[in-house]
Amino acid sequence: MHILLWLLTGAIVGWATGWLMVRKRYGSAVDAAIGVFGAVIFGFMIGSFGLLCPGSILEALLVAAVGASLLTFIVRRLKAPATA
């Protein structure tokens, strides 16, 4: 159940972060994919440390949102998108 929440939340947060960082957009699909990847990676990291409660939906949403935001921020700081 948590993985589905991570995927959905990551896509939404990645897309929204793309709109908030107007000058460095990669496109809606790439922004959403970065968010999904960040949400899943961060979710597994938090889960491996034993910090994720098995039944907490709100916690899963929060973990996904933080992970998606962090990875999107890091990717945008490391490399700016190519402009035509």
Image: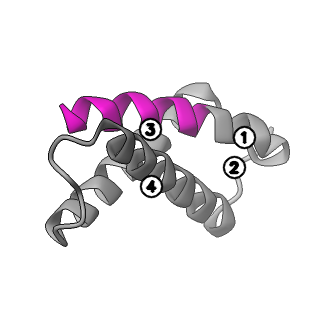
Residue 3 in magenta stretch? yes
- Assign a secondary structure to mark 1: loop
Left or right, residue 83 beside residue 75:
right
Instruction: Answer with mark 2 or mark 3, whichever residue precedes in sequence.
Output: 3
Alpha-carbon distance for marks 3 and 4?
8 Å
Left or right, residue 33 beside residue 7:
right
Which mark, by number, is residue 10? 3
Quadrant (top left, top right, bottom left, bottom right) of the C terminus? top right
Q: Residue drawn at (22%, 37%), measured in percent from left and top? A: 3
Is residue 31 at least partly visible in the picture? Answer: no
Labelled pair 2, 3 in contact (Cβ < 8 Å): no
| Numbered range of the magenta stretch | 1-15
Q: Where residue 52 sits in the image (x, y, percent)?
A: 23, 57
Q: Name the residue under label 4.
A: 67
Local crowd size for mark 1, using a 10 Å CA cut-off: few (<14), some (14–19), many (≥20): some
Q: Type of residue at label 1?
A: Arg
- Assign a secondary structure to mark 4: helix
Q: Where residue 55 sits in the image (x, y, percent)?
A: 18, 40
Q: Which of marks 4 and 1 is in front?
A: 4
Which mark, by number, is residue 81? 2
Rendered view: 64 above or below 79: above
